[in-house]
Amino acid sequence: MAGTDFKDPKKGKSKGKDVVVCGYPLSIFFIVVNEFCERFSYYGMRAVLVLYFKYFLRWDDDMSTSIYHTFVALCYLTPILGAIVADSWLGKFKTIIYLSIVYTLGQVAMAVSAIHDITDTDKDGTPDDMTFHVVMSMVGLFLIALGTGGIKPCVAAFGGDQFSDNQEKQRRTFFSVFYLCINGGSLLSTIITPILRAQECGIHTKQSCYPLAFGVPAALMVVALVVFIAGSGMYYKAEPQGNIMMDVCRCIGFAIKNRYRHRSGRYPKRQHWMDWAEEKYDKLLIAQIKMVLKVLFLYIPLPMFWTLFDQKGSRWTLQATTMDGNFGALVIQPDQMQTVNPILILTLVPIMDSVIYPLIKKCGLNFTPLKRMTVGMFLAALAFVCAALVQVEIDKSLPTFPSASQSQLKLLNMGAEPLKVTLPNNVQLELPPNQASEQYLTFAEEEVIVSVESRVGVGVTRALFLTKGVRETLLLPANISREWLLTEDLKAKPQQGNNAVRFINGMLTGVNVSIAGAEPTLLEPEYYSNYSQIKTGITTFTIRSGLESCDYRREFGFGSSYTFLIHSTFKFGPSCHESISAVEDIKPNSVPMALQIPQYFFITAGEVMFSVTGLEFSYSQAPSNMKAVLQAGWLLTVAIGNFIVLIVAELAKIPEQWAEYVLFASLLIAVCFFFSIMAYFYTYMDPAEIEAQFKKNVDDDNDDRALKQKMNLTRDSVESDEKDENKQTQL
C-alpha cells in the first residue's frame, strides 16, 4: 500500500491524495460499495412496488401496471439529462452527490407514504386519507426516477476516470466487478425486501410491512451516499468538457434546418441529408453522426423487446399472487420470483460466452450479433407464450364468482342432525350434521324459497332475499325454527396470497377465539365472526370460555378461504379439535409457482442474447467519441418499451390475461420478423478504419491546399519580379 499524488495528464491538475491497494486505487472501493448499495436500494424498492400499488393504494391491476411502467420509463429517460448535466455543467462527482441526495429523499418519501397509521384515524388498518399516501408515493417515485436515472451514466464513467492510462487491465477488472455488484445488489434485494414486506407491522393495527420494505432501501441509499462522500478526498474529479450529445443534436438540427431552406429544386442534391451541415460543422463530425444514425435506425424495432421484458416486475408478479409458492423446504413470496432473473443472468452469461457461442462457431454457422438479437427477441416472445399457458391453468383453478345479475348461495347445517333442503326448480340437498353444501348454488332471482326438513319431520319454509353479485352462506341453526342468518362471503380471492378465515359459533354460549399475538374476538351464540387474514403455514387458533381453552391447528396454503364451525355439541378437552369442522369456501391456489421458471428462463436467455449482444454490437459500430450517444439511444428504447405497456394496459382493456400475453408475444414476433429483414440488409462497418481513412483524405486535401497556396505564392512572386523589370526598362 502506498500513497501517491496522481496528476491529470490532460490538465496537470492534482487528482488528490490516492492510496493504491494491490495495484488498484483505493477510491474505486468506495465507488463499488456505493453502486452495490444503490442497486440494492433501487431493485429492492421496485420488487414490491406493484404489490404496494394494488394492495396498499387499492389500485386495480391495469392501474398498478400503468404507473409501474411509467416509473420505469422515467428511470430510463433521466440518464440523458444526467449525462448532459455532468458533462456540461457540474461534473460527474457533483452530479452524483446532488442527485443521490434527491434519490435518498425519494426513498424516504416512499417509506413515509406506506405508513398507514398516519391517516388511520379510526384505527381499522385502512388509511382514511388515501390522497396523502398517493401524493407522497408519486413525489417519491419522481425523485427516485430523477436520482437513479441521473447518476446511472455517471458512476461507471467516474470509476473509470480513477485509473491512469497504464492501468488498462485494472480498469477492465473494475468494470467486471462493477457489473457483478449490480447483479449482486439486485439479487439480494429481491430476496430480502419481499420477506420484509411479508412481515406485519403498525402502531394500532398490524398490516403488511411496506414501510419496512421501503425503509431498508432508503437506509441503503443513505449508506451509499455516505460511503461515496467518504472517499471524496481520493477521487480524481475531471472538469466538465462539454457533452457530445449536445453537439450531435445541434449538428442534426442545423442539417434539417439548412435542408429545409434549400428545398427548392434549383439547389443541387447532396449524397446524404446530413451533408447539408457542411457549411457549419466539420466533415469528420458529420461522417461520425452518419455512422451513429445507421445504428440508431436499427433501434426502431427494439422497444418491443423491453415492452415484454419489464413486465416480469408487474404482470408476472401479479400472476404469481394467484399461484402456490410452496417449493417443499422453501416457501416463496410472489415478489421473490423475480430473483430467478439475476440468478439466471449470472449463470447464462458465462455459459453463452464460453460454451454456446463457441460451439455454434465450430459448427460453421455465422451467428452474427444481429442474428443473436433476433433470436433473443424470439425467446422473449416464447416466454410470454409460456406465461399465457400458465395463466390458462390458473384460470381453470379459479372459482366462478357471480356476475352483476347473479347471486350465489351456500347452506351450512349448524346442528347435530342431518337436514333435507328443497330449493327452487325442485333442487334437493342432503346436509350432513355440521357440514355445508359442497358448491355454491347460482340464482338469477332475488327472492328464493327454501324449505328445510329435519329427520324428525319438522319442516320450515322461508323466503330469502339474495343480493346481486354477492356470495352468501345460509346458517341453519340446530333448531331450524330459530332465526336463519345470511352471511356475506368473499367474492374474490384473498389478496397477496393470504388466506381468509372466520369462525361460526354453533353453541348456545359465547366463546372467545384468538390467534397468537392478536386480541381475542368474542363470538356470540349461533353467530359468526369477521374474516381474518392468515399467512401461509401452520396457524394455531385458541378457543376460550372462562378458564377452559382449546387449541385448533391448521395448515394453510395460498389464497384460500375457510369457515370454521364450532359444533353445537362442542366440549373442551384433549379431543376438542374434533368438534370443529372446516368448510372450504375458496380453494387454495393449486398451480405451483415453479411453473413460472420456464418463462423466466426464456426471458433471461433472451435478455442475454439481446441486451448484452446489442450493447456490444452498438459500441463496435459507433465512433469512439459517440458511445454516449448510442447509450442514450439504447436507454431511450427501454423507456419507449415501458410506455407501450402503459398504452396497452390502459387502452386495450383485454378481459382475459392470457389473451394479453398472447397479444404481446404476437407483436414481438411480428417486430422480430421486420428486424430480421433490417439485419439482413445491414452492412457491418469498422468505424476506426472509416475515421482513419477520412482523416487521411482530409490530410491529403490539406496537403493539396497547401501546395496550391505555395504555387500561388511562387506565381505571385514571379509576376512581381516581371513587373519590376518592366518598370526599370521604361525608366
Image: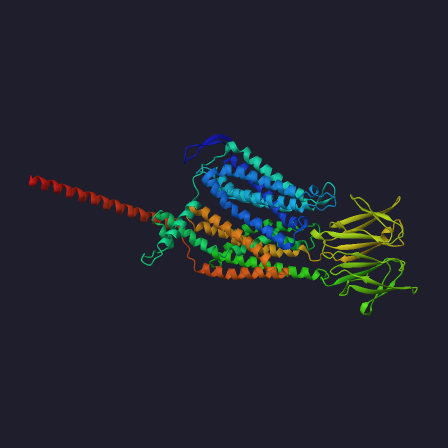
Residue 606 seen from this side: no
Q: How many marks?
A: 0
Which colour style is shown?
A: rainbow
Question: In the figure, 235 relative to 507: above or below?
Answer: above
**Residue 349 image offset from top left, x and y in percent:** 54, 50
Q: Residue furthest bottom?
A: 425
**Residue 61 image offset from top left, x and y in percent:** 64, 54
**Residue 573 image offset from top left, x and y in percent:** 89, 49
Q: Is residue 358 left or right of residue 315?
A: left
Residue 584 falls in which quadrant of the image? bottom right
**Residue 219 image offset from top left, x and y in percent:** 62, 38
Q: Is residue 481 left or right of residue 596?
A: right
Q: Residue furthest right?
A: 456
Residue at horizontal 91 percent and vertical 64 percent from the top: 458
In this rendered view, identify the residue nearer to me: 654 or 596: 654
Q: Please identify the quadrant where the C terminus is shown.
A: top left
Residue 667 falls in which quadrant of the image? bottom right
Question: In the figure, 407 relative to 90: above or below?
Answer: below
Q: Is residue 429 left or right of residue 118?
A: right
Residue 230 seen from this side: yes
In this rendered view, identify the residue nearer to me: 457 or 234: 457
